[in-house]
C-alpha cells in the first residue's frame, strides 16, 4: 500500500512503536497503547498543529498487526504485537484496519482529549487523530462507551474495522479544507454497510456516544453552517455520524444528547401540525399539554360516539349491511357542521341536550372512562361461563384479532339469549 | 417516519364488520354492553389498520388480556413508569439561581406531562421519549380517523 510505504515509519516486524512515529502522529497513538488507561493527554499535542495527514498512515500501519492478533476484541497489549507480519498490501485490509481504530477510539477519546484542548484547530487535529488512534485505546474507550462489549463478535470487530476505514478515508482527503467549521451529517459511505446490524441495536438503544464521530465531509456536500442530520435510519451504514457544530462542546455525551434533542424537537414539530391550535405554541411543556388534552378529548369522543351508536342501535343492524355495501363516505361533507358542533361540545364539556340521541339518566357521560368501565366490566366478567374457543394467544396479528373477536363473542352471549349463544363463531374477516 | 393516513373506508369497513360480528341486537344487551362492544370494535378496527405501530400491538394485547383474564379492570398498570421525578426536585432545592430553577421546574413539568402521555397512549409505558412521540403521532392520526368514521356512522343512521 502506498501509504505504508511512503511513510517509511511502520515496522513490518511488529516492533514497538517507533519513536519516530510520535513526532508525526502525536502522543495519542504512542501513549494510548502503553498506558492503557486512556488518560494520556496534553503533552503530545503541541506537535500536532504542524502535522498534516497525521492519522492515516499510522493507523493503517498499526492496526493490521493488532488485528492479526485480535480474535474477537482487541487484546491489546502495551506493545505493538510482535507478530506484525509483512504489511498487508491489500488495500481492503488496510482500510479495515484504519476503520477499526477510528471507530472504536473516537467517542471516549474525544471526551478525554477535548477537555484539555481549547484550540479549535488542535481539536480538529485531535479529532482526525482519533481516527488513527490505536485500537487498544479504543478498546478501553469502548468499555467506557455505550457499546455493549458482551455481545461483540468477530462480526463486530470487522464492523469496526470497516467503520474505521471509512472515517480514515474521509479524514484523509478532507483534512485540508476542514477549516474550523464542523457539520453534522450522516455517514453514507456504503463501505460501512456490512454486518453492522449487531452494532446497530446497541447504538439505537439510545446512546450514540461511541458511534458519533467527527468526520470531515468529503463527499462534496459541504455546507457552511449546520447541516440537517438525517435522523432516520441510514440505509447502508447503521450509525448516525454526527459532527459537532462550531462553538459547541464536542463531548461525545453532549453530542448524543444533542442528537436526541433534535430528534425530539423534530417530532414535536410534526405533532404541532397535527394537533389543532398548536401552531403558535412554542415550548415543550405547553405542547405536551396540548397533546395530552387532544388525545384525551379524542378518546372521550370515541366513548361518546360509541354510546351514541349504541343508543341508535335499533337501526344499527339494519343499516350495517347496507352501509357495508354502499359508500357512505360521500356524506362526509355534510358532516362538517356536525363535526364542528360536537367538537365544541366536547371541549366545553357540555352534555348535549338532544333527547333523541341520549337516553336519559346518563349523567357524567363525558367523563366515562374509569367508573364506566368498571361498571361495565363487572357484570360482564362476573357472568362469563363460556371459555374462549381458542384459549391460546397466538402471536400473529390475525390470530390475535380472531381471538379477541371470538372471546368477545363468547362473552356476550352469556348475558343474552341462547339463540345468540349457539351461533358459531366465524373467522373474522376484514 | 410518517405513515400514510389511514383510509377511512378501510376503517369503516373494519369497524362495521366487527360490529356485525358481535351481533349487536337490541334484545339481551343493555345499553352499556352495547356501547362496550361498539367501543371494542372501534379499538380493534383502529389497531388493525396500523399493525406495525407499537401502540396498536399494545392495544391489542390489552384488549385480549382484558378478555382472557376476565379481570374487572384492564391490567394497564402493570408496567412501572420508567422515569421518575426525583432529579428535578433535588435540583430545585440545591440551586439558587433563578435561571437554573426555572429550567429545573420546566423539566419537572415536562416530565410529569410526559408521564401522563404515557398513560394515555397504549403501550406508552415501555417506550423512550422519541418513540413515545412517534407513537403519539400515529395514534392521534388513527384516533382522528376513527372519530370521523363514527360520526359519519351516527349521521348516517339518524
Image: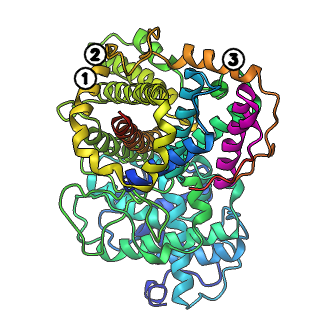
Marks 2 and 3: CB-CB under 8 Å? no
Q: Nearer the viewer, residue A334 or A178?
A: A334
The image shows residue B41 at horizontal and vertical percentages of 55, 39
Side (left or right) of A388 relative to A95? right
| Residue lying at 46% horizontally and 35% vertically, measured from the top left | A315
Can residue A19 be seen here? The reply is no
The image shows residue A336 at horizontal and vertical percentages of 22, 38
| Residue lying at 41% horizontally and 41% vertically, measured from the top left | B146
Please determine whether, in this image, residue B115 is positioned above or below residue B95: below
Query: Which residue matches tag 3?
Result: A378
**Magenta highlight on residue A225:** no
Marks 1 and 2: CB-CB under 8 Å? yes
| Mark seen at residue A348 | 2
Number of residues whose C-alpha sits closer than 10 Å to that of mark 1, classed few (under 14), some (14–19) or many (20 or more): few
Q: CA distance from mark 1 to mark 2?
A: 6 Å
Mark 1 on the same chain as mark 3: yes
**Magenta highlight on residue A420:** yes
Please determine whether, in this image, residue A376 is positioned above or below residue B18: above
Circle 2 marks a residue in which chain?
A
Number of residues whose C-alpha sits closer than 10 Å to that of mark 2, classed few (under 14), some (14–19) or many (20 or more): few
* Residue range (magenta): A396-423
| Mark seen at residue A127 | none
The image shows residue A103 at horizontal and vertical percentages of 51, 64
| Residue lying at 64% horizontally and 48% vertically, measured from the top left | A401
Query: Which residue matches tag 1?
Result: A344
Amino acid at each position: 500500500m502506498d501509504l505504508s510505504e511512503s511513510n517509511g515509519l511502520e515496522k513490518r516486524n511488529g516492533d514497538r512503536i517507533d519513536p519516530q512515529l510520535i513526532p508525526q502522529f502525536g502522543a495519542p497513538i504512542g501513549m494510548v497503547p502503553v498506558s492503557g488507561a486512556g488518560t494520556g493527554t496534553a503533552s503530545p499535542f503541541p506537535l500536532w498543529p504542524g502535522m498534516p495527514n497525521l492519522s492515516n498512515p499510522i493507523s493503517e500501519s498499526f492496526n493490521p498487526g493488532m488485528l492479526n492478533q485480535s480474535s474477537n476484541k482487541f487484546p491489546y497489549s502495551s506493545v505493538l504485537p510482535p507478530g506484525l507480519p509483512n504489511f498487508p498490501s491489500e488495500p481492503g485490509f488496510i482500510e479495515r484496519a484504519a476503520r477499526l481504530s477510528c471507530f472504536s477510539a473516537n467517542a471516549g477519546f474525544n471526551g478525554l482529549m477535548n477537555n484539555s484542548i481549547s484550540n479549535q484547530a488542535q481539536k480538529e487535529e485531535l479529532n482526525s487523530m482519533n481516527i488513527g488512534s490505536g485500537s487498544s485505546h479504543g478498546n478501553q474507550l469502548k468499555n467506557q462507551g455505550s457499546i455493549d462489549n458482551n455481545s461483540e463478535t468477530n462480526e463486530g470487530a470487522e464492523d469496526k474495522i470497516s467503520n474505521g476505514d471509512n472515517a480514515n478515508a474521509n479524514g484523509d482527503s478532507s483534512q485540508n479544507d476542514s477549516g474550523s467549521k464542523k457539520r453534522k451529517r450522516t455517514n453514507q459511505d456504503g463501505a460501512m454497510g456490512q454486518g453492522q446490524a449487531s452494532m446497530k441495536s446497541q447504538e439505537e438503544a439510545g446512546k450514540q456516544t461511541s458511534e458519533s464521530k467527527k468526520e470531515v465531509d468529503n463527499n462534496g456536500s459541504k455546507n457552511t453552517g449546520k447541516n440537517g442530520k438525517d435522523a432516520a435510519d441510514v440505509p447502508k451504514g447503521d450509525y448516525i455520524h454526527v459532527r459537532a457544530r462550531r462553538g459547541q462542546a464536542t463531548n461525545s455525551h453532549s453530542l448524543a444528547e444533542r442528537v436526541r434533542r433534535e430528534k425530539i424537537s423534530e417530532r414535536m414539530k410534526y405533532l404541532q401540525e397535527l394537533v389543532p391550535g398548536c401552531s403558535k405554541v412554542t415550548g415543550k411543556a405547553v405542547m405536551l399539554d396540548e397533546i395530552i388534552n387532544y388525545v384525551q378529548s379524542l378518546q372521550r369522543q370515541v366513548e361518546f360516539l360509541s354510546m351514541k351508536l349504541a343508543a341508535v342501535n335499533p337501526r344499527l343492524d339494519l343499516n350495517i349491511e347496507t352501509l357495508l355495501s354502499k359508500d357512505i363516505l360521500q356524506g362526509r361533507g355534510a358532516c362538517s357542521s356536525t363535526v364542528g358542533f360536537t367538537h365544541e361540545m366536547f371541549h366545553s364539556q357540555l352534555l348535549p341536550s338532544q333527547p333523541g340521541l341520549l337516553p336519559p339518566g346518563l349523567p357524567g357521560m363525558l367523563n366515562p372512562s374509569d367508573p364506566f368501565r368498571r361498571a361495565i366490566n363487572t357484570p360482564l366478567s362476573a357472568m362469563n361461563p363460556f371459555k374462549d374457543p381458542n384459549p391460546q394467544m397466538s402471536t400473529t396479528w390475525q390470530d390475535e384479532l380472531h381471538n379477541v373477536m371470538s372471546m368477545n363473542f363468547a362473552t356476550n352471549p352469556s348475558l343474552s339469549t341462547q339463540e345468540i349463544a349457539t351461533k358459531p363463531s366465524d373467522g373474522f374477516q376484514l | 417516519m410518517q405513515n400514510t393516513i389511514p383510509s377511512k373506508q378501510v376503517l369503516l369497513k373494519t369497524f362495521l364488520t366487527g360490529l356485525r360480528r358481535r351481533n349487536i341486537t337490541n334484545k339481551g344487551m343493555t345499553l352499556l354492553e352495547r356501547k362496550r362492544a361498539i367501543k371494542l370494535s372501534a379499538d380493534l378496527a383502529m389497531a388493525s389498520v396500523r399493525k406495525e405501530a407499537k401502540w396498536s400491538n399494545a392495544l391489542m394485547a390489552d384488549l385480549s388480556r382484558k378478555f382472557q383474564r376476565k379481570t374487572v379492570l384492564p391490567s394497564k398498570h402493570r408496567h412501572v413508569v420508567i422515569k421518575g421525578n426525583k432529579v428535578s426536585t433535588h435540583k430545585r432545592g440545591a440551586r439558587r439561581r433563578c435561571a437554573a430553577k426555572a429550567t429545573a421546574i420546566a423539566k419537572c413539568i415536562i416530565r410529569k406531562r410526559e408521564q401522563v402521555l404515557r398513560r394515555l397512549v397504549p403501550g406508552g409505558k415501555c417506550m423512550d421519549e422519541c418513540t413515545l412521540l412517534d407513537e403519539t403521532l400515529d395514534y392521534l392520526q388513527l384516533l382522528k380517523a376513527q372519530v370521523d368514521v363514527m360520526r359519519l356512522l351516527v349521521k348516517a343512521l339518524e
